[in-house]
Amino acid sequence: MSDDILQARAAAVIEGNKYLTLATVNASGTPWVTPVYFTPDGHTHFYWASAPEAQHSQNLARDPEVSIAIFDSSVAIGHAEALYLTAHAHQVPEAELVQCAELYAARYPELREFAPDGLRAPADLRLYRATATRHWILVRGGDPEYGTGVDTRVPVWTSG
């Protein structure tokens, strides 16, 4: 399989979707998944705004290891494209908030303004960033170029 083709497919999944599914675990190890709309910064950094009291925010404050799936659930069965990631996630540090808030808000001009003051106390939301460590792309079993008859996850990128 061509790395260039698979990387281009992975980049298209990132750019073509507005939501990612974020998976965290609580203190007892119970998984928690939630959809969040996101802004990518390349294929390594992913930003979203959430309340610090949200279950996923509390979970990642305690354990920053997360898993992520990005996919379009509206496509017909058998036509799915998906990207799976492992990542470290945390609240964006104050020193980076202005720059990161501008990046985040630029993808969603139709939403309310996400100025830095709306993403720090006493406001209700904070800006979070996941930094991907590994990426896999879904290769459908019936893929005309790479299909094997069974859906598989193929490694695409590994980050530091």
Image: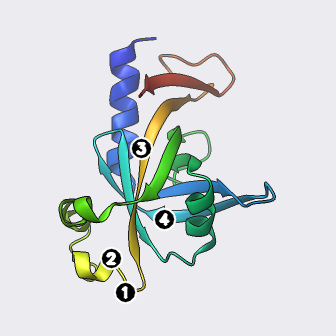
| Residue highlighted by disc 1 | 123
Please name whichever residue, 31 or 5, is drawn nearer the observer in this view of the structure. 31
Splitting the image into 4 quarters, where does residue 32 fall?
bottom right
Q: Position of residue 96 (x, y in %)?
A: 24, 59
| Residue highlighted by disc 3 | 131
Labels 3 and 4: the sequence-earlier one:
4
Q: Residue furthest top?
A: 1
Left or right: 113 as drawn, with respect to 6: left
Labels 4 and 1: the sequence-earlier one:
4
Kindly identify the amino acid type of the residue bearing the numbered disc 4.
Answer: Val
Kindly identify the amino acid type of the residue bearing the numbered disc 1.
Answer: Ala
Q: Residue at x 24, y 75 (%)?
A: 116
Kindly identify the amino acid type of the residue bearing the numbered disc 3.
Answer: Thr
Cβ atoms at labels 3 and 1 below 8 Å apart: no
| Residue highlighted by disc 2 | 119
Q: What number is the disc on residue 35? A: none
Q: CA distance from mark 2 to mark 1?
A: 6 Å
Q: Residue at x 60, y 65 (%)?
A: 56
Q: Residue at x 60, y 39 (%)?
A: 78
Label 3 or label 4, whichever lies nearer to me, is 3
Q: Residue furthest bottom?
A: 122
Label 2 crowd bin: few (<14), some (14–19), many (20+), radius 10 Å: many
Q: Position of residue 120 (x, y in %)?
A: 33, 78
Labels 3 and 1: the sequence-earlier one:
1
Left or right: 32 as drawn, with respect to 65: right
Cβ atoms at labels 3 and 4 below 8 Å apart: no
Please name whichever residue, 105 or 108, is drawn nearer the observer in this view of the structure. 105
Kindly identify the amino acid type of the residue bearing the numbered disc 2.
Answer: Leu
Splitting the image into 4 quarters, where does residue 8 fall?
top left
Q: What number is the disc on residue 36? A: 4
Label 1 crowd bin: few (<14), some (14–19), many (20+), radius 10 Å: few
Q: CA distance from mark 4 to mark 1?
A: 18 Å
